[in-house]
Amino acid sequence: MNVGARIRSIRVENGLSQEDLAAKAGINRTYLSQLENSKSSPTLEVLERIARAMDTAAATLISDPQTAREPEPHYEAESSEMIYSGLQEFLDDERTQLLMSPSSGEIQLLKGIRFLDRFQPSKQFFIDALFDYRRNKSSDESNSE
């Protein structure tokens, strides 16, 4: 099941119309329809807003718990949480940490990213994802002012 289908499924389970969910998530209903019909792909920030509006975790929208095949953990963190080697490299690099200063919330968001099969995202993927998240977050904040 893809992201759009997961959003629709959880929305319907929660008894929400597209209009209700779009309003709660602060997005356009037409955009939500495009997401649900796989005509558009959401950013991490939009996924987070949709998940929050439906009182669920963003990771729930990314993978179907019944069919997802998680890669075997490459690294064991405290509380048995799986971390991709690229993310671990990102977290271990002092220079990257000093330059980017990720907040604990941003690190949790990056840790919540999951892929099917054995895809191993690189350190650069997580840097780009954090930049994209911040760019979208700052544009949303400036639009709300």
Image (cartoon, helix red, strand yellow):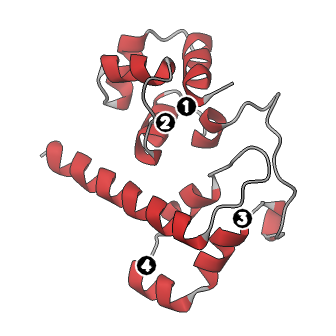
Q: Given the image, on which type of amino acid does mark 3 rest?
A: Tyr
Residue at numbered disc 4:
101
Q: Is residue 79 left or right of residue 120?
A: right
Disc with the residue nearer the chain's start (2 vs 3): 2
Q: Are marks 1 and 4 in contact (CB under 8 Å)?
A: no
Q: Residue at coordinates 52% horizontally, 34% vertically from top-left?
A: 51
Q: Given the image, on which type of amino acid does mark 2 rest?
A: Arg
**In this rendering, which labeled residue sits more in front, label 4 or label 2?**
4
Q: Given the image, on which type of amino acid does mark 1 rest?
A: Asp
Disc with the residue nearer the chain's start (4 vs 2): 2
Q: Are marks 1 and 2 in contact (CB under 8 Å)?
A: yes
Can residue 104 be seen here? The reply is no
Residue at numbered disc 2:
52
View extreme (right): residue: 72
Q: As displayed, is residue 38 above or below residue 20?
A: below
Q: Position of residue 67 (x, y in %)?
A: 81, 30
